[in-house]
Image (cartoon, coloured by chain):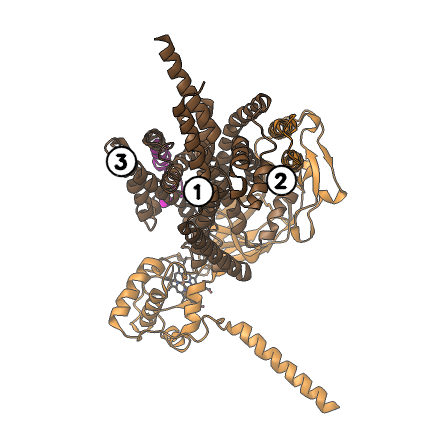
Amino acid sequence: MRSRAIESFQDRLERVSLAPLIHTQKTYYLFVFLLLATVAWGLYAYAIQLRYGLVTTGLGDQVMYGVYIVNFVFFIGISYAGALVSAILRLTNAGWRSPITRISEIIAVGGLTDGALQPIIDLGHPERAWHIIAYGRFQSPLLWDIIAITTYLVGSLLYLYLPLIPDLALARDRLGQSASGFKRKIFTVFAVGWQDTPDQRKRLNRAIGIMAIMIIPLAVSVHTVVAFIFSMTLRPGWNSTIYGVYFVIGAVFSGTAVLLIVIAIFRKVYHFEEYIKEKHFRNLGYMLLALLLLYLYLTFTEYLTGGYKMEEGEEQLLTLVMLGKNAPWFWFFVIAGMIVPAFLLIFSKLKTIPMVLIAAVLVVLGMWVKRYIIIVPTLEVPLMPFEFGSYSPTWVEISIGLATLAGFSVMVTLAAKFMPLVSVWELKEEAEKETHHKEEAEGQR
Amino acid sequence: MNSKWLLAATLSILLFAVSSAAVLAQEPPPPYAGVKNPFAWNDAGVLSAGKTVYEQFCGSCHGATGAGVSAFDFSSASYSKQLEAKPDSVFWALSEGRITKGMPPYKSTLSEEKRWQVITYIHSLGGAPSTPGPTPAATPPVENGSLTLSVPPAGQTGDPVTFTATLKDGQGKPRTGEKVKFLLLEDFFARGLVEAGEATTDGQGVAALEYIPRRPGEPEVVAWFGKLETRSRIAIADSGDVFYHTEAGIRMPAPGPEIWIGPESAFDLGPQGNAPNTALRLPGGMLSWLWLFVLVLIAVYVTYIVTLYQVLRISTVKGAGATNASLVPRMAILAMIGLGVMVVLMVITGPYSHFHLG
């Protein structure tokens, strides 16, 4: 007994959400072309690095982690958007999540693949990456890392794929000849014969329920282990017990900010205003604020406990970070990455969407810089009186870094052509529930 | 015939001489070969800029006057002359450093311009009247004194040995309360003196240092006091103990004998210290703590497979109809099994030397 209003809501939903799969604007091609050109330039830079070795980078004996490892931590962090928004909100049954879960899961997979590539790029001999599989020892944090990231990546793919099945079936049934043959094949194969029978629904919901629980501890393990790469050493700044927590919170924080930016872009480009509403920006904005305060708190305790005890090397590190040559970066993080966004978010009621978005952009920049501050200065603190490490990235690293960002954007952009960006069936369920409630309320009256 | 041999011999001697001369002279390699100072040697602005750099970065080792490193005394006129003749070689040394000798590289710390500025300043140091700088009075007046060293002829890694040095002045009287330094001439990546410790002389002028040798070999022991120096040899046998942790954490009581499966070669390091062969290993035997991690991983991958099984069942529901509908879940389940096995194997296998240490 559906009312007319719902009918038209559903039709419109299908039309709007399936439109990007078949209609492509000229600007889209231009954008993808630019991104691919950036990736190609990065590949050229990588070819140079392979040909001449790591001398083409600013890395050396003392500072052996640079832009690549910063990007590694950064992009793995971004992947948290998926774990957080979709799994936590799904488990807490927050109804407003439906329009943004898909996008956050896409970001998760894109960020993870991009991040996982970075340590391999960082190797002078990338073909030796398999040594960690063949010769890895359990006591090496690098082995923990490979295991955790692989497992989480697989889990994220599954978690992206499961809620996609009904929507792929929708694309298979509705698009017909308007989609290319290749796409139709993909929709058919990956929709695994979904007919929306009660039995199928039951199984799908069971599978999604399992994965939503599973993905959270997996995500936590991944960034904890990433932090362990640093905190299992005795170097100033890294020798910390809270690094696991610190990295996990930092990841959720930056992941939420990236999610805000990406949903804003998709909303604008594909006219999702009816589904991704101001409410989403407001709710995510408050979440971002809470995470910001948490991260600020952890940063404060981290520097206070280190700086108060002033172990050997710590003084050098703090001087380097707060007053020395890394000071501009550090104060950029503090002011532009923490304080300004905090105020923007606190007063975001004034003009929600623009203010939250500016805060999100600043947070993303600030968190990239923070990862740089965590990784590079510690290595610049000498272990021996004559080992002055000093790092500045070369054009090769900058090119590959930009290509990494472009690669992430390409993955997210192309995903828009192969899957509906909003979870159509979950939105329909939500809408049905709402009218159901309304009708019940009216009936009681 | 004869003349040919003569020619060949002369040529090879010549070649040898040239190449050894090249090695000895240490000509700068390509990016540095032949570079010249872009500044005039007496440009006042450059000199003052160079002075600032010098005081900030170099003075601590080379001294304010430039005489701090005696092998390269910048305050001598001859060094300035040498510098003028071969600026490229100095620029090279400054850029790449002489790390093994204690001279740091500056190519990433100082811009090319700054490096030339400081070189110009160093050049000026040789022209200035060399005022004796505040050289530390490191040599106390033990004129014609004597320092004798006695070390046990042999020792073993891990067992303490005692080095004693006796310090007497010119009259043969023992000196009390002086610090004698002990060093070992070690061959570890590079040959050099490694400090073993310091001891103070007692009433008899005897300084004794207890030292635990960690590396087998026959190093020379050196005792230093000011300009006095004596040497003596000790033979250190390998006791087989290792002085580092082979595993992280404290050694837990093992519930059973360790289990390992692998080739005999897994016991030894490979050639040139390469990792030994991979073997399967369970520290603590069948009740190994490693199982905990293996179980967690198995649980995760089994969950994945269970999830995919649900998808498989979705595809085989009656009426699903489509051909090869279950292709994706089937392939995915196979991939999961493969990945799970790989991950578990990564945890329980690896190259482990020092099996005997547990």
The chief SS type of the magenta part is helix
Q: Which chain is orange?
A: B
User: How many circles with numbers are drawn on the protein?
Assistant: 3
Circle 3 packing at 10 Å, graded few (<14), some (14-19), many (20+), is many
Which quarter of the image is occupied by the N terminus of chain A?
Answer: top left
How far is disc 2 from disc 3 in space, using C-alphas? 47 Å
Residue under circle 1?
Answer: A74
Which percent across, then down, holds residue A22?
48, 43
Residue A62: where, in percent of width, then height?
Answer: 47, 52
- Chain assignment, label 3: A
Q: Secondary structure at mark 3?
A: helix
Residue B40 in magenta stretch? no
For label 3, the residue is A344
State the extent of the magenta-drawn residues as a range. Answer: A296-317
| Label 2 CA crowd tier, 10 Å (few <14, some 14–19, many 20+) | many
Mark 3 vs mark 1: which is more N-terminal?
1
Residue under disc 2 on the same chain as residue under disc 3: yes
Give the letter of the brown chain.
A
Q: Are marks 1 and 2 on the same chain?
A: yes
Q: Chain of mark 1?
A: A
> Closer to the camera: disc 3 or disc 1?
3
State left or right for residue B68 relative to residue B288.
left
The single residue placed furthest to the left in the displayed view is: A350
